[in-house]
Image (cartoon, rainbow, N blue to C red):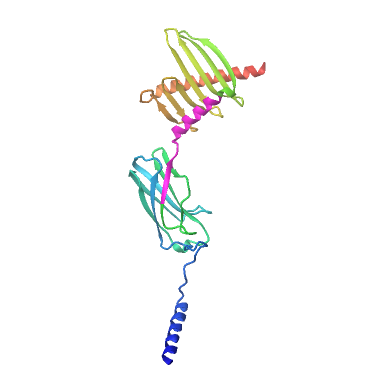
């Protein structure tokens, strides 16, 4: 009997010693999973929604953030990548800065020339059952040139609902007919059709922003030019390939501004009648 009491006392001493050691069990979430994932490194793999090869010099910026307070990032790193994904990376973090009650996520942005890739969904890590190994899927956004082309097409599709003015005139070599479309008192779109005396036809479309700045020029069957808000040419395409020279750009720009002035004057005059 004495032996049994000694064994019981020894077991009790071990139990009490464990409680006094200061070691506490990891906090757990309601689903029974650890509230904070163990470790101090996040590993991630970046894939693309649409498979493509990434050019040399592309930059992959990665960030570990508090979902509720994304700035500043807890960790931020930029990597140079190229070739075919997946692109793997790791982020070392300080576990002392992680709170079990908060939510965290990894952000990744890939920039390849004018093309930007971003994730459509959040990628949670570390807390509320999320781990330290994740995959991030990135989707390409429209380039500035693509966005401008889309804006031009949308504007062209809306001219039927705008106020219209038109006119005709002749030169030594051609007969010209034009019509323009006005929105909130500003000329937004002008179509100029030219019948050459020597034979042949030409058609050019001019588009302008709400601030009346020249936005886009499209020659039917020919070149396309587009400007951003800073007045920089970001679309310069010739049919069949190649680009316009500066003197050609200047000529088209001047023709667009002449058409705009002519149409705006005609519209303003019509309102005074």
Q: Is residue 32 above or below residue 258?
A: below
Quarter of the image that includes the C terminus: top right
Q: Residue furthest front?
A: 1
Of 270 and 90, nearer the camera is 90
Q: Main secondary structure of the magenta part?
A: helix
**180 in magenta:** no
Of 47 and 141, nearer the camera is 47
**Quadrant housing residue 232:** top left
Q: Residue at x 46, y 17 (%)?
A: 203
Label count reads 0
Q: Is residue 145 above or below residue 172?
A: below
Q: Is residue 85 left or right of residue 201?
A: left
Point out residue 114 in the picture as x, y percentages from the top left corner: 41, 37
Q: Residue at x 45, y 80 (%)?
A: 15
**140 in magenta:** yes
Look at the image and give the residue range highlighted in magenta: 135-158
Q: Is residue 257 left or right of residue 222?
A: right
Q: Residue furthest bottom?
A: 2
Point out residue 208 in the picture as x, y percentages from the top left corner: 53, 26
Q: Is residue 223 left or right of residue 186?
A: left
Q: Residue at x 38, y 38 (%)?
A: 113
Point out residue 92 in the picture as x, y percentages from the top left corner: 40, 58
Q: Is residue 2 above or below residue 260?
A: below
Q: Residue at x 49, y 65 (%)?
A: 28
């Amino acid at each position: 009997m004495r032996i049994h009491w000694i064994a019981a006392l020894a077991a009790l001493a071990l139990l009490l010693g464990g409680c006094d050691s200061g070691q506490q069990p990891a906090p757990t979430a309601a689903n029974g999973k650890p509230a904070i994932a163990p470790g101090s490194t996040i590993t991630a793999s970046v894939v693309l929604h649409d498979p493509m090869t990434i050019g040399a010099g592309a930059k992959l910026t990665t960030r570990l953030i508090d979902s509720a307070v994304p700035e500043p990032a807890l960790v931020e790193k930029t990597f140079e990548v190229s070739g075919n994904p997946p692109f793997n990376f790791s982020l070392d973090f300080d576990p002392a800065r992680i709170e079990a009650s908060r939510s965290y996520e990894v952000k990744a942005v890939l920039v390849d020339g004018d093309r930007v890739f971003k994730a459509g969904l959040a990628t949670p890590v570390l807390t509320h059952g999320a781990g330290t190994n994740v995959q991030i899927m990135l989707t390409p956004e429209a380039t500035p040139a693509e966005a401008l082309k889309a804006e031009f097409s949308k504007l062209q599709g809306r001219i039927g609902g705008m106020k219209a003015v038109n006119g005709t005139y002749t030169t030594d070599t051609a007969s010209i007919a034009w019509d323009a479309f006005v929105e909130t008192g500003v000329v937004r779109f002008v179509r100029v059709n030219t019948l050459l005396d020597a034979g042949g036809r030409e058609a050019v479309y001019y588009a302008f922003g709400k601030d009346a700045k020249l936005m886009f020029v499209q020659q039917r069957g020919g070149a396309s030019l587009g400007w951003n808000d800073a007045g920089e040419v970001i679309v310069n395409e010739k049919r069949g390939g190649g680009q316009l020279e500066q003197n050609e750009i200047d000529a088209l720009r001047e023709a667009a501004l002449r058409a705009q002035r002519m149409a705006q004057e005609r519209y303003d005059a019509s309102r005074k009648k």
